[in-house]
Every structure is written in structure tokens, then in C-alpha cells.
């Protein structure tokens, strides 16, 4: 497996990082972290039932977005989790016409970020 290398700008940015939390265990990232003295912390991620997404935390646009993301990108019965939100975000970039009813792609991506905030704040460890 090739070992990833960092640009000078990326390396400079790492000077401000103390810890990186990961869900998976990519070997290349472990090598880079070790080289730069970073601690890696592994976390299983968060899950949240789609009907637990509340409008009060990040606004009224987020619960309907959560329902759509869940319907289109999650398996039946599966709670929301970061990978599901990530699939939706990738879709916004690759298929912007699919999301045109929500307005500009940048707004939809911002709302997906807000949905992730809801997941992390209210979700439980997977």
C-alpha cells in the first residue's frame, strides 16, 4: 500500500491539530499521524432515528431534509449516520439536478452539515 504524503500547506495545518477521531482504521493515516506526533482516536460514530431530528436545533429545513436523506440513502430500518449523510452530500455534488428543488447546491450542502451537527449532538454511539 502506498504511503500518503502531505504538501507543505497540509503539514503546516497539522501543527494546530492535537487529535484526529476516526471511524475506520486506515493504515496510511496512522503513518502520517505518527510522523507528525498526532494522537488517533477511534470512534464508532453516531446514530439517530430519523424521526428524532428536531427543527429547534438547526432550523425547520433540517427534519424534511433528514427524512429525504433517509428515504433515498439509508436501508429500511437503518438510523441516520454519517455515511448516509455523506452519500447524500456526494449526490449533491455529482447529481445537482436531483436536488434542484432545494435551491442552490451550496445551501443544500450547508443543510447537510447542519444535519450532521444534529446527528453528533443528539445521536448515540453506534
Image (cartoon, helix red, strand yellow):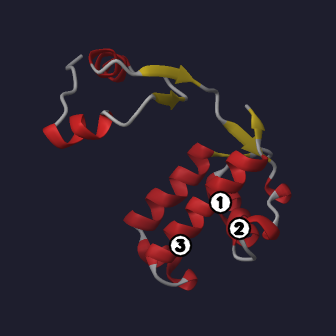
Tell me the residue that label 3 is attached to.
Answer: 108
Per the image, label 3 sits on a secondary structure element best described as helix
Tell me the residue that label 2 is attached to.
Answer: 58
Residue 23 screen position, x and y as percent: 55, 29
Residue 51 screen position, x and y as percent: 85, 58
Whether residue 28 can be seen here: yes
**Of callouts 1 and 2, the N-terminal one:** 2
Give the distance between the C-alpha atoms of the residues marked 1 and 2, in whole angstroms. Answer: 8 Å
**Of callouts 3 and 2, the N-terminal one:** 2
Looking at the rendering, in which quadrant would you find the C terminus?
Answer: top right
Residue 59 screen position, x and y as percent: 73, 73
Residue 42 lies left or right of residue 119; in this view the side is left
Instruction: Determine the residue positioned at 34% across, 21% down.
Output: 33
Q: Is residue 62 above or below residue 12?
A: below
**Of callouts 1 and 3, the N-terminal one:** 3
Q: Is residue 25 above or below residue 79?
A: above
* Contact check, label 1 and label 2, Cβ < 8 Å: yes
Mark 2 Cα shell of 10 Å, populated few (<14), some (14-19), many (≥20): some
Tell me the residue that label 1 is attached to.
Answer: 115
Whether residue 76 can be seen here: no
Query: Which callout, 1 or 2, points to the residue nearer the camera?
Result: 2
Residue 88 screen position, x and y as percent: 54, 59
Pick whichever, 75 or 26, lies toward us.
26
Pick whichever, 96 or 61, lies toward us.
61
Q: Is residue 32 above or below residue 70?
A: above
* Quarter where residue 70 is shown: bottom right
Per the image, label 2 sits on a secondary structure element best described as helix
Give the distance between the C-alpha atoms of the residues marked 1 and 3, in whole angstroms. Answer: 10 Å
Instruction: Determine the residue positioned at 31% across, 34% down.
Output: 14
Query: Which callout, 3 or 2, points to the residue nearer the camera?
Result: 2
Amino acid at each position: 500500500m502506498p504511503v500518503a504524503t502531505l504538501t507543505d500547506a497540509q503539514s503546516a495545518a497539522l501543527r494546530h491539530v492535537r487529535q484526529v477521531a476516526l471511524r475506520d482504521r486506515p493504515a496510511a493515516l496512522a503513518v502520517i499521524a505518527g510522523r507528525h506526533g498526532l494522537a488517533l482516536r477511534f470512534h464508532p460514530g453516531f446514530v439517530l432515528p430519523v424521526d428524532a431530528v428536531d427543527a429547534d436545533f438547526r432550523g425547520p429545513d433540517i427534519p424534511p431534509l433528514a427524512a429525504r436523506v433517509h428515504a433515498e440513502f439509508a436501508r429500511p430500518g437503518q438510523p441516520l449516520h454519517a455515511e448516509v449523510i455523506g452519500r447524500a452530500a456526494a449526490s449533491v455534488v455529482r447529481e445537482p439536478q436531483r436536488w434542484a428543488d432545494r435551491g442552490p447546491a451550496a445551501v443544500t450542502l450547508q443543510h447537510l452539515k447542519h444535519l450532521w451537527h444534529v446527528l453528533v449532538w443528539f445521536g448515540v454511539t453506534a
